[in-house]
Image: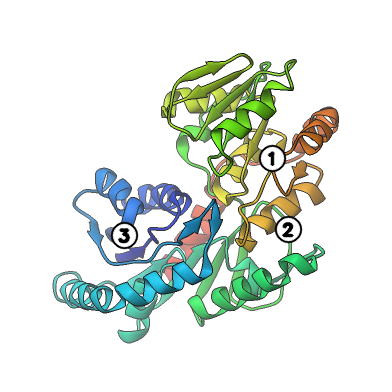
């Protein structure tokens, strides 16, 4: 079967998730991948003959916060060029490849391609839970606008797909048909990582200023912190800054007694797979991150903070034994649940 797979360029979580699925699909199917930005560069190295570049869009940030006005301005400014590039790619794919089915990881080019050529389309992502399930958390007034925007975007992004596979680490009651909840999609390197617990805390984020973060962590002198996100090597008493190395990062990740992070879905999913207590500081104006942090707190897997501040960190550390015990209840063996559902869907369209 010929499959066209779309991956957005914004956020590497989409690309790492797609890599897992593509490695499963490529053994039995003819695949073409379209993406943009960092995701395109990442996937091009792994699937050089199958990956094609399109024009996507990225969020614009100001002081670590998503800027809605700057994001909108950038999209409008780049729209004419994006349309020209993507229209040509659409024609080329239809001439040279002619896919039988489309898979989209919250990516618009492949969605419109499927609708234009009347092809079956499968959505695989974590975002659709906002529109297709009932959320069992209280949404504060401060997040209400972000929630309404996020839900509207998700609802409009990929409507009327033939099937929605929704990756999630929490359970939710579905309210729309053609929707299935599946466990998080975990990359092979994490699946193969041996769980262990040593006396350090892993911090993975860069939205907080380096100087502020180090000063704050130095006050917790009885704890050892290993920090990824600033891309430098340095020691500051109980704080060690590390340049990114996948081997070192996974080793520090699998052996951490807890993790501090923003609230990106992929990293949180991997932390839960490794049974690590989580302290999250969601990026402001990204409701998906607020949602992830709220469910981490609701399920007792950790704590959500508005900012990296001393009282909240101390409260998390004081309750660490409770969080450690709770997070051990999260159990996932592999990605086979998703693969079985995916294969059954594809088989139904394989004529």
Occupied quadrant, residue 167: bottom right
Q: Which quarter of the figure is the C terminus placed in?
A: bottom left
Q: Which residue is mark 1?
A: 308
Residue at 53%, 52% in the rendered image? 63
In three-dimensional space, the C-alpha distance between marks 2 and 1, rounded to whole angstroms, equals 28 Å
Q: Nearer the viewer, residue 38 or 255?
A: 38
Q: Which residue is mark 2?
A: 171
Q: Which quarter of the figure is the N terminus placed in?
A: bottom left
Mark 2 vs 1, N-terminal side: 2
In three-dimensional space, the C-alpha distance between marks 2 and 3, rounded to whole angstroms, equals 32 Å
Q: Is residue 120 visible?
A: yes
Q: Is residue 351 visible?
A: no
Occupied quadrant, residue 181: bottom right
Question: Badge 3: how crowded within 10 Å, few (<14), some, or many (20+)?
Answer: many
Mark 3 vs 1, N-terminal side: 3
Q: Nearer the viewer, mark 2 or mark 1?
A: 1
- Look at the picture and state if 26 lies above or below 203: below
SS of the residue under disc 1: loop
Tell me residue 290's x, y (percent): 68, 57
SS of the residue under disc 3: loop
Question: Badge 1: how crowded within 10 Å, few (<14), some, or many (20+)?
Answer: many
Question: Is 67 on the left or on the right of 118, as rendered?
Answer: right
Q: Which residue is mark 3?
A: 36
Tell me residue 190's x, y (percent): 52, 34
Residue at 48%, 41% in the rendered image? 187
Color scheme of the displayed model: rainbow
Occupied quadrant, residue 350: bottom left
Mark 2 vs 3, N-terminal side: 3
Residue at 73%, 71% in the rendered image? 144
In three-dimensional space, the C-alpha distance between marks 3 and 1, rounded to whole angstroms, equals 32 Å
Tell me residue 42's x, y (percent): 32, 46
């Amino acid at each position: 079967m010929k499959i066209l797979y779309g991956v957005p360029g914004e956020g590497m979580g989409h690309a790492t998730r797609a890599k897992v699925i593509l490695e499963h699909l490529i053994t039995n199917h003819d695949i073409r991948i379209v993406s943009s930005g960092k995701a395109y560069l990442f996937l091009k190295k792994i699937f050089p003959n199958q990956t094609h570049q399109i024009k996507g869009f990225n969020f614009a940030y100001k002081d670590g916060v998503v800027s809605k006005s700057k994001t909108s301005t950038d999209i409008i400014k780049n729209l004419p060029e994006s349309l020209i590039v993507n229209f040509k790619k659409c024609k080329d794919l239809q001439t040279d490849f002619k896919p039988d089915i489309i898979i989209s990881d919250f990516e618009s080019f492949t969605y419109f391609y499927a609708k234009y050529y009347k092809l079956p389309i499968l959505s695989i992502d974590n975002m659709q839970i906002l529109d297709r399930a009932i959320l069992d958390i209280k949404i504060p007034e401060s997040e209400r606008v972000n929630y309404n925007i996020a839900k509207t975007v998700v609802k409009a992004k990929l409507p009327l797909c033939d099937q929605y596979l929704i990756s999630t680490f929490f359970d939710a009651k579905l309210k729309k048909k053609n929707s299935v909840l599946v466990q998080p999609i975990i990359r092979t390197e994490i699946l193969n990582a041996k769980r262990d617990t040593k006396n350090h805390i892993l911090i993975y984020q860069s939205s907080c200023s380096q100087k502020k973060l180090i000063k704050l962590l130095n006050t917790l002198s009885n704890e050892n912190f290993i920090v990824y996100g600033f891309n430098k090597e340095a020691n500051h008493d109980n704080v060690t800054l590390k340049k990114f190395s996948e081997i070192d990062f996974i080793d520090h990740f699998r052996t951490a007694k807890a993790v501090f992070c923003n609230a990106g879905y992929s990293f949180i999913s991997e932390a839960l797979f490794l049974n690590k207590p989580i302290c999250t500081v969601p990026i402001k104006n990204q409701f998906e991150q607020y949602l992830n942090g709220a469910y981490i707190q609701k399920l007792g897997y950790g704590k959500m903070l508005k900012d990296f501040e001393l009282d909240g960190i101390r409260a998390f550390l004081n309750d660490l034994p409770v969080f450690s015990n709770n997070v051990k209840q999260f159990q996932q063996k592999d990605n086979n649940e998703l693969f079985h559902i995916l294969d059954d869907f594809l088989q139904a369209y394989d004529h």
